Image: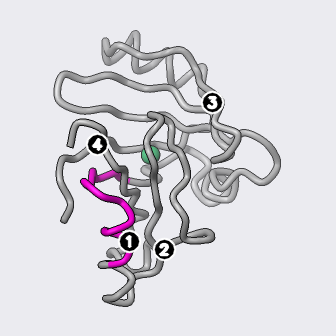
Amino acid sequence: MIGRFNHVAIAVPDLEAATKKYREVLGAKVSEPQNEPDHGVTVVFVELPNTKVELLHPLGEKSPIKGFLDKNPDGGIHHICYEVDDILAAREQLKATGARVLGDGNPKIGAHGNPVLFLHPKDFYGTLVELEQAKHA
Ligand code: CO
């Protein structure tokens, strides 16, 4: 069901400092910050030759990243994202196995303009998994 690896997302306590570190210490190409109010995050994209890293920072009071950073004040890996061809078909297949889809279970539009869903970390070995319906898939 899952296809290509799309990105790993890292929650960071200071987006400016993290951007600078990826740009200047690691020498990576880093985008300008983008606000994602539907997801409660501000994100910058680190473009690597074969994949992407997203640096996430809380946006707004109800940000899901906020609690994560309270527990991990230095930051940490927040989720990983796999691509799927058909997100609704993937959702139904996963739900049939008992896997829990977060939120209201309906895909939201993610940072790349594609529909995304999140799966409960307890069902996937302590890892929050994002599924993204990729355009090129
Ligand atoms: Co993501």
Tell me the element at label 2.
loop
Q: Which residue is mark 2?
A: 101
Q: Which region is colored magenta?
A: 80-92
Q: Residues within 10 Å of mark 1 (few under 14, many from 20)?
A: many
Check disc 2 and give the amino acid type. Val
- Observer-nearest residue: 133 or 77? 133
Residue labelled with disc 3: 14
Position of 105 relative to 40 (above/below):
below
Q: Which mark is residue 59?
A: none
For label 4, the SS is: strand
Q: Position of residue 23 (x, y in %)?
A: 40, 13
**Circle 4 sits on which residue?**
6
Q: Residue at x 42, y 54 (%)?
A: 79
Q: Residues within 10 Å of mark 2 (few under 14, many from 20)?
A: many
What is the three-letter code of the residue carrying label 1? Arg
**In the rendered structure, which disc, 1 or 2, sits on the residue that comes first in sequence?**
1
Question: Label 1's element?
Answer: helix
Mark 4 crowd level (few <14, some 14–19, many ≥20, 10 Å Cα) = some
Q: Is residue 118 left or right of residue 49?
A: right
For marks 4 and 1, give the one nearer the viewer: 1
Tell which of 73 and 23 is nearer to you: 23
Q: Is mark 4 within 8 Å of ligand 1?
A: yes
Residue 122, quarter of picture: bottom left
Q: Three-letter amino acid code at disc 3?
A: Asp
Q: Is residue 86 magenta?
A: yes
Q: CA distance from mark 4 to mark 1?
A: 18 Å
Q: Does the residue at mark 1 contact the one at mark 2 (Cβ under 8 Å)?
A: yes
Q: Measured along the vertical axis of the image, is residue 53 above or below residue 93?
A: above
Ligand 1 within 8 Å of disc 1? The answer is no
Residue 115 drawn at (x, y percent):
45, 49
